Image (cartoon, grey):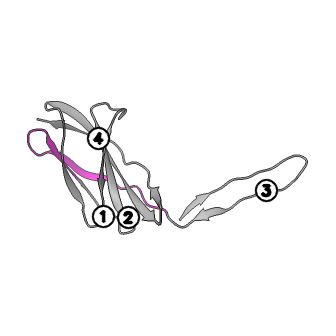
Amino acid sequence: KAYAYNTISDSMCKSSVSNYKTKYRLSTPSLTKVICSGTKKYTATWKKNSKASGYQIEYGTSSALTNATKVKITSTSTTSKKVTVSKSQKNYYVRIRSYVTVGKYTYYSGWSSKVKVYVK
């Protein structure tokens, strides 16, 4: 469960508004393995999150992941993805997060730790 908490208080009016709750909270997935799997390719592997609707992988050559590329995985049973990158012989930084879609809203978990992989 995710809880958003907001308190509004005023010296003139001693009131508060709190406990805006949503019932969708996802744990942050972790990358179990990221390996080079050929020229301009790497494979990322993670543990399945049974509450997720899918996953989103973000990767880039900058450790800050500026101008990073995102790959959306819509299958809940997928626990690995082979990704083709644009430049070879570079270090890539990779991270992942899970998401759940409810109606027209999508709720994301936090990002995992970044993993560095050298792509041939």
Q: Which picture quadrant has residue 116?
A: top left
* Helix, strand or loop at mark 2: loop
User: At 79% from the left edge and 56% from the top edge, which residue is drawn?
Assistant: 16
- Name the residue that disc number 2 marks: 52
Amino acid tagged 4: Tyr
Cα–Cα gap, marks 4 and 2: 20 Å
Segment tinted magenta in the rendering: 25-44
Disc 1 marks a residue whose amino acid type is Lys
Q: Cβ–Cβ below 8 Å for labels 1 and 3?
A: no
Q: What residue is disc 3 on? A: 16
- Would you say 49 lies left or right of 89 here? right
User: Which of the pair 94/69 is nearer the observer?
Assistant: 69
* Callout count: 4
Q: Which label's residue is closer to the chain start, 1 or 3? A: 3
What is the C-alpha distance between the residues marked 2 and 1? 8 Å
In the figure, residue 51 lies in which quadrant? bottom left
- Label 1, on which residue? 48
Q: Residue at x 76, y 51 (%)?
A: 8
- Check the image and report above or below for 6 versus 101: above
